[in-house]
Image (cartoon, rainbow, N blue to C red):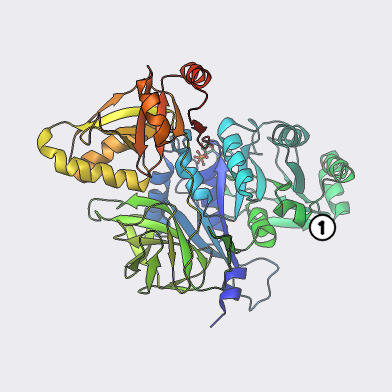
Amino acid sequence: MSSIADEVSRRRTFAIISHPDAGKSTMTEALALHARVINEAGAIHGKAGRKSTVSDWMEMEKARGISVSSTALQFNYTSSGAAEDAEPSVINLVDTPGHADFSEDTYRVLTAVDAAVMLIDAAKGLEPQTLKLFQVCRHRGIPVITVINKWDRPGRTPLELLDEISERIGLTPTPLFWPVGIAGDFRGLRDVRKDEYVHFTRTAGGAKIAPEEHLSTDAALDREGDVWAEAVEETELMTEMGQGHDQEMFLAGQTSPVIFTSAILNFGVRQLLEALVELAPAPHSRTAIDESERAVTDPFSAVVFKVQAGMDAAHRDRLAFMRIVSGEFERGMVVQHAQTGKPFATKYAMTVVGRDRETVETAYPGDVVGLVNANALAPGDTLYDGAKVQFPPIPSFAPEHFAVVRADSAGKYKQFRKGIEQLGTEGVVQLLRNDVRGDASPVMAAVGPMQFEVVVARMKTEFNVDVQVERLGYSVARRTDAASADELNRQRGVEVFERNDGALLALFSDKWRLQYIEKEHPSLSLEPLVAAA
Ligand code: GDP
């Protein structure tokens, strides 16, 4: 039996942040291939019209019979330099929703990871969603490894791309592996720290791990000539500018190790895994609301970061995904739910395997476990054993889209209420109520309008209720207090609501209306909400 500290030290929990289409699904698959979870990546590669990540997971699962879910993929990886009898590293890759409308969901997911891989398309550089997600990582102090992907296709120069990163987001890039060959002519990588050449050979369709040859500097020069010399020159320039890897600065979020890859050819993917194992932090202690630190070796504790409906009709119940913060989790243990003070039995603890579920018997800090029948649990909740601990809640974002929702037929009111309540608890949308509108037509508040579509679809499939959605003309929300509410409600273009977390929100038709009211009534309490990532 290994100790908790040993289990923790071999774990790495991370997410890939990227703009849609940068290659997150392809990279996920390539990582799984390198961890030898799957034998061949051909099933998905080269296919035109890839659909959503979810269908990719499903397809992978069907084709390969591997352990995947749309929430977390766990795999073992044995580092190439590891001692023969060493335990493999355990890698937890937590999936982030791709669309900007679900940034609130993404923010919650990022509370569950210890590091992020920022995946950039070599031809496009930093894109809007990458930037937003990066800001979330910065805000949370999550160290970031930068991956410049699609180097097999024409793109920008490495120096241009790295300049953009340091200029636009103030993160100093520190290359670990520099490309040999311009974008579109990817021959291999210069291992900056070892000063050697890693030459890759393509496999048919990029379906297999690309064979590597390791060459000395001289042999590399013989083989690649000017192309090698240029890679050396450019990396030396970076080193002279002080852009070598520094572990402390990386962990402090000031620098970011950089690797160039082609996920589709499986070039540089092993190097990324090695960097994660070598450099990304293992799970560490977490600060509780009372400012105490819960060490990883303390008794069991975990944070719920996502609640999801059963993935198909056969499993109607809800899964609450928790990230373990401390201690050992054993299925069946009865833990405490900090928010309600009630015990919670963990008889059904799962990882999701495509459409099926696999039982988890034990898990350790950094691991993600899905709890079945978890209707009482909401994102941000704490579960613990032993001494009480409660971790800070996950902030709700400032909503910018608002819509009334009501049941199509009055006869369905009971199901409607139950369904809407549940979706509010899960955080699919925020729910706003006031006496004037009443319970039959609450207002949904969202960061992105696609969240409303999710409500409509789920109300229909899970609760069998057709709902009507009517958009409201508000676009700005402020937190207010009871003392200000009456005055605000008297204003034109303003309405005050209670949100499902108890906060009082005032909605304004637009920011000019807000500014005018602030000026006319300076004593009113109007606090900005946390801005969306
Ligand atoms: P996601 O939206 O970030 O998950 O991106 P996907 O993994 O679905 O990739 C988007 C498109 O880029 C797909 O057509 C992939 O085949 C392609 N792609 C991904 N990685 C690479 C790469 O390294 N090189 C090339 N040429 N294409 C890639």
Residue 295 appears left or right of 99: right
Q: Where the C terminus falls, by quadrant?
A: top right
- Looking at the image, residue 163 lies above or below residue 235: above
Name the foreground residue: 90 vs 519: 519
Q: Which residue is mark 1?
A: 194
Q: Position of residue 365 (x, y in %)?
A: 53, 66
Above/below status of 24 relative to 346: above
SS category of the residue bearing label 1: loop
User: Residue 67's quadrant in the figure?
Assistant: bottom left
Task: Residue at 47%, 51% (x, y): give it.
Answer: 393
Q: Which quadrant contains ligand 1? A: top right
Residue 247 lies in what quarter of the image?
bottom right
Residue drawn at the location 23% of the way across and 51% of the way down: 313
Q: Amino acid at mark 1?
A: Lys
Can residue 509 be seen by looking at this rendering? Answer: yes
Q: Position of residue 403 (x, y in %)?
A: 32, 28
Q: Residues within 10 Å of mark 1 (few under 14, many from 20)?
A: few
Q: Is residue 270 left or right of residue 214?
A: left
Please, which residue is most extreme toward the bottom here? Answer: 1
Side of 69 relative to 470 (left or right)? right
Residue 37 visible in the current orientation: no
Residue shown at 60% from the left, 75% from the top: 6
Q: Position of residue 448 (x, y in %)?
A: 42, 31
The answer to whether residue 477 is above or below residue 223 is above
Residue toward you, 296 or 52: 296
Q: Is residue 201 above or below residue 3?
A: above
User: Residue 172: x percent and y percent?
Assistant: 76, 42
Q: Is mark 1 within 8 Å of ligand 1?
A: no
